Amino acid sequence: MQRRMAGWGNGLLGVIIFSASLPATRVAVGGFDPVFLTAARAVIATGLGVLCLLVLQEKRPLKSDIRSLTIVAFGVVVGFPLCTALALEHITSARSIVFIGLLPLLTAFFGVLRGGERPHPVFWIFSGLGSALVAGFAWFQGAEGSVTGDLYMVLAIIVCGLGYAEGGILSRRLGGWQVISWALALSLPVMAPIALFTLPSDWTHVTLPQWTGLAYVSVFSMLVGFIFWYRGLATGGIAGVGQLQLLQPFFGLMLAGLLLGEVVSAGMVLVTGLVVLCVAGAKRFA
């Protein structure tokens, strides 16, 4: 029982860490180009991840794992950070968090494609309803948002769901934080040159909050959050602790309002709550 409770505690901490990612990214893109931000956070996290791998003398992945690690890197190291950074140039972090409500659902969808899972037919009813809610919200609130920003968020959720599902499969053998560390290391030959090529020519305009945002998404969103999240899944049970991810939109909206002073409309809260209910129903029949 104590081990299971520790798993839930680690899982909750991981969700809270991830919940601050979009508000932190929203702050960081005010001072950094989205492409540089994506590459820089990957390079910084790679240094820390590789250091952990060397100190703990973790076993190397097999050659057959390279394809899966490439998918993980594409989804959570490159795709999601870049798409969200681009989206947050056009929309608020509060608006973007509505889309995060679909992340557990997309992860389950790719679990069907990549992991061979076969959810109950009712699962797809909840899936379609949740997708319709998000699409409807984005359509009717178009005056307050941006089609470009919304499309970037949809793409971000798709690639992140793919990266989570692939990483979840691979972590059964390599371990969770090891998977993200190896994926980061694999991406370094690409991300390091991009970071150097997009290096800002003038740093004087970058404020302390923007530096803090870069540090947060590099250290916590890209690495530390995965350590707690996957430790929670391993010790508390994937099915149970995985439900904690449904709390992420609520934590994210709260942080966007408290830290950034963004307006969190009643419509955003309502749609987020309905999407979370749909995801919970879908997970029930997954």
Image (cartoon, rainbow, N blue to C red):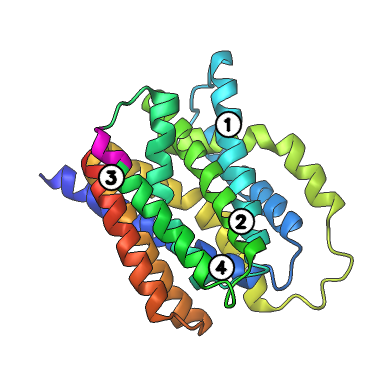
Q: CA distance from mark 3 to mark 1?
A: 25 Å
Q: In the displayed image of the protein, which residue is found farthest to the left?
A: 1
Quarter of the figure with residue 31: bottom right
Q: Residues within 10 Å of mark 1 (few under 14, many from 20)?
A: many
Q: CA distance from mark 3 to mark 2?
A: 23 Å
* 77 w.r.t. 276: above or below: above
Would you say residue 136 is visible in this rendering?
yes
Please report whichever mark, 1 or 2, sits nearer to the chain's N-terminal start. Answer: 1
Return the residue nearer the eye: 60 or 260. 260
Q: Residue at x 75, y 56 (%)?
A: 36
x, y (%) of residue 12?
A: 30, 56
Q: Which residue is mark 4?
A: 24
Quarter of the figure with residue 51: top right
- Horizontal side of 174 relative to 86 (left or right) equals left
Amino acid on which the number 4 mark rests in the picture: Ala
Check disc 1 and report its element: helix, strand or loop.
helix
Nearest to viewer (mark 1 / mark 4):
1
Q: Residues within 10 Å of mark 3 (few under 14, many from 20)?
A: many
Nearest to viewer (mark 3 / mark 4):
3
Q: In the displayed image of the protein, which residue is found farthest to the right?
A: 201
Return the residue nearer the eye: 284 or 174. 284
x, y (%) of residue 159?
A: 56, 42
Label annotation for residue 95: none
Q: Which residue is mark 2?
A: 151
x, y (%) of residue 46?
A: 62, 43
Q: Are marks 1 and 4 in contact (CB under 8 Å)?
A: no
Q: CA distance from mark 3 to mark 4?
A: 29 Å
* 116 w.r.t. 164: above or below: above
Q: CA distance from mark 2 to mark 4?
A: 20 Å
Please report whichever mark, 1 or 4, sits nearer to the chain's N-terminal start. Answer: 4
